[in-house]
Image: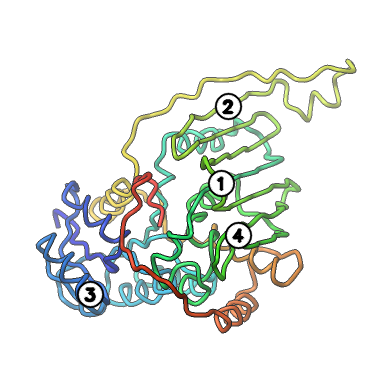
């Protein structure tokens, strides 16, 4: 096999975005598309000169693909992936890998049984800033982590939510900002800072006419006693992302405004806080916090980077940067925040699968059909490299 033959399942705005860059791959190629809307499937298939299908199982059974890239609404990710794994196909799923940790766990088990490549579209892991942070952490430059915090202050208008009947509904999307805009940030947060042990969260709908949350925030506790805070919302302009990781020997700060990265800052603390605090005899003294330059290696970013890595893993055994099994980390945190809010209690991770399913079913039962919809399938133009849905 010289190239991985890829079928895109779900030809909406995000799916069309994936189709666009396929011709740039030297290790993969678009060979089929699928969408449940006949006109969309036909149009996208014709545009890219590949066969189109209305059922994902027909695409999978066509013999035209080695792998599928799933870009459907969230609830469909696990069942489509499981169907693919049963047929011996590789899977690259859009985020989140599922709506609930129970269904995501089924997806991961199916991948393990199949032995096929499984990746998730968390393209921020390819960004030089986050790669550099990972190296600092792996090298022990921060020492024991004491505090982590992340702010994901994004913006979405009501017109955005009115562009699809599935958007921002419990029955169609399974959540709001935590299941749509925040997964990329939550992935980075858990990839670098770790998955917390205890979550005390709140959600609310502040500015939009939607059933689900447009803001969420939580206080976190980790197994080693470290604490944290996370905020996600779609009510801010300019849009800001801010990650802070504080350890005994150093601190990392990564910020961006309106998707423009402002670099990574790393302070090396000498001597470590734990030593200086007990050994120092001066009343107003503090350990030296030296700002250290962090080299950033230029690398391919965005969706194409994830897809290329996925194809190279299949062809050459290259290590996946975004393994599908790690997609459950961010989902554990999102589910825990929602469960904590509705059950009015602190939630322990791993989230109790059946308890969350019971909550979700209750919320879905109350979900009402949306009115005033102007169906639009348009890929985000603010920053396509981040792949926001």
Give how far across and how far down residue 103 sits, in percent: 49, 74
Q: Secondary structure at mark 1?
A: strand
* Label at residue 236: 1
Q: Secondary structure at mark 2?
A: strand
* Residue at x-position 66% and y-position 43%: 148
Q: Secondary structure at mark 4?
A: helix
Question: Marks 2/3: CA distance?
Answer: 47 Å
Contact? badges 2 and 3 (CB < 8 Å): no
Q: Which residue is at the far bottom? A: 365
Up the image or down, 69 lies above or below 61; here it is above
Q: Which residue is mark 2?
A: 266
Up the image or down, 322 lies above or below 58; here it is above
Q: Earlier in the sequence, mark 4 or mark 2?
A: 2
* Label at residue 60: 3
Contact? badges 2 and 1 (CB < 8 Å): no
The quadrant in which the N terminus is found is bottom left
Q: Secondary structure at mark 3?
A: helix
Q: Residue 41, located in which quarter of the rendered image?
A: bottom left
Give how far across and how far down residue 110 sits, in percent: 40, 73
Nearest to the eye among marks 2 and 1: give it: 1
Question: Marks 4/3: CA distance?
Answer: 32 Å
Q: Earlier in the sequence, mark 2 or mark 1?
A: 1
* Residue at x-position 54% and y-position 41%: 241
């Amino acid at each position: 096999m010289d190239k991985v033959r890829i079928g895109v399942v779900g030809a909406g705005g995000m799916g069309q975005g994936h189709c666009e860059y396929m011709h740039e791959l030297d290790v993969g190629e678009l060979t089929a598309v699928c969408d449940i809307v006949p006109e969309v499937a036909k149009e996208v298939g014709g545009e890219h000169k590949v066969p189109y299908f209305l059922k994902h199982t027909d695409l999978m059974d066509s013999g035209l693909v080695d792998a599928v890239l799933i870009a459907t609404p969230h609830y469909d990710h696990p069942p489509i992936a499981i169907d693919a794994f049963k047929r011996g196909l590789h899977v690259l799923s859009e985020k989140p890998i599922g709506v609930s940790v129970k269904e995501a766990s089924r997806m991961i088990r199916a991948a393990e049984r199949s032995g096929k490549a499984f990746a998730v579209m968390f393209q921020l892991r390819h960004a030089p800033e986050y790669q550099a942070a990972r190296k600092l952490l792996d090298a022990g430059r921060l020492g024991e982590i004491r505090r982590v915090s992340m702010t994901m202050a994004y913006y979405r208008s009501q017109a955005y939510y009115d562009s699809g009947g599935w958007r921002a509904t419990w029955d169609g999307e399974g959540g709001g900002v935590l299941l749509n805009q925040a997964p990329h940030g939550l992935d980075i947060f858990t990839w670098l800072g770790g998955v917390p042990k205890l979550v005390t969260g709140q959600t609310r709908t502040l500015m939009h006419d939607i059933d689900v949350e447009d803001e969420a925030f939580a206080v976190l506790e980790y197994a080693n006693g470290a604490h944290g805070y996370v905020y996600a919302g779609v009510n801010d302009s300019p849009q800001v992302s801010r990650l802070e990781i504080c350890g005994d020997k150093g601190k990392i700060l990564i910020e961006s405004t309106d998707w423009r990265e402002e670099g990574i800052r790393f302070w090396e603390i000498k001597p470590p806080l734990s030593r200086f605090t007990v050994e120092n005899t001066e009343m107003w003294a503090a350990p030296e916090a030296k700002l250290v330059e962090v080299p950033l290696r230029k690398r391919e970013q965005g969706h194409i980077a994830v897809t290329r890595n996925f194809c190279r893993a299949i062809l050459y055994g290259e290590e996946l940067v975004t393994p599908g099994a790690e997609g459950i980390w961010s989902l554990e945190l999102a589910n825990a925040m929602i469960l904590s809010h509705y059950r009015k209690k602190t939630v322990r991770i791993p989230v109790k699968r059946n308890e969350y399913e019971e909550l979700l079913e209750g919320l879905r039962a109350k979900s009402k059909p949306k009115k005033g919809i102007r169906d639009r399938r348009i890929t985000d133009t603010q920053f396509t490299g981040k792949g926001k849905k």
